[in-house]
Amino acid sequence: MNTYNGWKNYETWNINLWLDSGESFREDVVCNEELQDTYALAQHIENFIDELYGQDCKVYGMFTDLLNAALNEVDYYEIAENWLSSWQDEINEARDEEN
């Protein structure tokens, strides 16, 4: 199995790299119990990428086909698992504060 920097593949690593550099996803997850489920968070991330892609890609052709192929390789579930694991302490603290 080919991996990239400990991730399933380059595409997954790259999406994680770009998205994990911001605080907005962390805040969303810590404050929203629904996003603390791996599958739900993976869907949330994928929908976010789909929205970005829809805004920026108005041209069709070779480059769009290549981008589509790359996005199809992204393992959003792996990203969600990693994030939830990394943020578990913050999630627990937020739950404790609510109770």
Image (cartoon, rainbow, N blue to C red):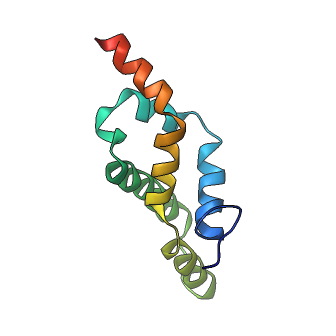
Q: Residue at x 66, y 69 (%)?
A: 10
Whether 36 is drawn above or below 5: the answer is above
Give percent across and percent down for residue 53.
Answer: 51, 64
**30 is higher (above) or lower (below) than 83:** above
Q: Residue at x 61, y 38 (%)?
A: 22
Residue at point 69%, 68% (across, down): 4
Residue lying furthest bottom in this view? 62
Which picture quadrant has residue 60?
bottom right
Up/down of 78 relative to 38, above or below: below
Q: Is residue 46 left or right of residue 13?
A: left
Q: Nearer the viewer, residue 61 or 73?
A: 73
Q: Is residue 6 above or below residue 67?
A: above
Q: Quadrant of the N terminus?
A: bottom right
Residue at the extreme front of the image, as rendered: 1
How many numbered discs sit on the rendered protein?
0
Percent of width and height locating residue 50: 44, 62
Q: Quadrant of the C terminus?
A: top left
- Where in the figure is residue 86, as x and y percent of width and height? 54, 38
Q: Is residue 35 left or right of residue 81?
A: left
Residue 89 in the image: state x and y as whole percent: 49, 26
* 66 or 60: nearer the viewer: 66
Residue drawn at (63%, 82%) of the image: 63
